[in-house]
Image (cartoon, rainbow, N blue to C red):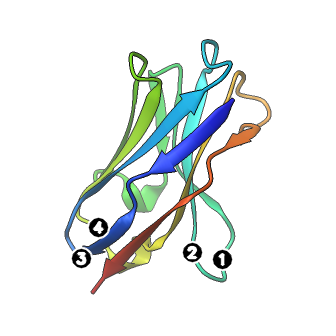
């Protein structure tokens, strides 16, 4: 499975961005998809995860602002980010696997930088 993340950029506080992650390869049985982020000097952390498109989990600080979704017709998952804050600044990575174990999954996108200016 190959993942290609895109959609990052520079946005002002309160703004919105939508990240995309296009999947290719053996994608038909992917059931775990997620977004992680890593800020400078910090460990990578889970932002949002989705299992089979129904079960969704979010980091507490992004609940109500971020939405993870998946479009099977386009083999793409998304992270809609609204009301962005400076603390959301990080490199965002998409993640996927055919199973919920291991968690995170084995496949990673290359990362896309989100910068939120104050």
- The answer for how far apart the CA atoms under marks 3 and 1 are is 21 Å
**Where residue 57 appears, x then y in whole percent?**
49, 40
Name the N-terminal-most of marks 4 and 1.
1
Q: Is mark 3 on a helix, strand or loop?
A: loop
Q: Cβ–Cβ below 8 Å for labels 2 and 1?
A: yes
Marked residue nearer the N-terminal end (2 or 4): 2
Rate crowding at label 1 as few (under 14), some (14 to 19) or many (20 or more) other CA atoms within 10 Å.
few
In-image side of 96 versus 66 (left or right)? right
Mark carried by residue 39:
2
Q: Mark 4 points at which residue?
A: 84
Kind of element beneath mark 2: loop
Q: What residue do we see at 23% from left, 60% from top?
A: 16
The residue singled out by tag 3 in the image is: 13
- What residue would you read off at disc 1? 42
What is the distance, in whole Å, between disc 3 and disc 2 at their CAs? 17 Å
Q: What element carries label 4?
A: loop
Give the image location of residue 96, x and y in percent. 64, 34
Does residue 96 appear in this view?
no
Q: Distance between the residues labelled 4 and 1?
A: 19 Å
Helix or strand or loop: what does disc 1 sit on? loop
Q: In this view, does 46 lie to the left or right of 100?
A: left
């Amino acid at each position: 499975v190959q993942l290609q993340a895109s959609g990052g950029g520079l946005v002002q506080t309160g703004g919105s961005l939508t990240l995309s992650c296009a999947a290719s390869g053996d994608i038909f049985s992917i059931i775990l998809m997620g977004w992680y982020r890593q800020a400078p000097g910090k460990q990578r952390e889970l932002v949002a995860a989705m299992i089979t498109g129904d079960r969704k989990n979010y980091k507490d600080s992004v609940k109500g602002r971020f939405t993870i979704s998946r479009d099977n017709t386009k083999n793409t998952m998304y992270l809609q980010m609204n009301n962005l804050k400076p603390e959301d600044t990080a490199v965002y990575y998409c993640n996927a696997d055919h199973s919920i174990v291991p968690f995170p999954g084995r496949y990673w996108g290359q990362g896309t930088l989100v910068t939120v200016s104050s």
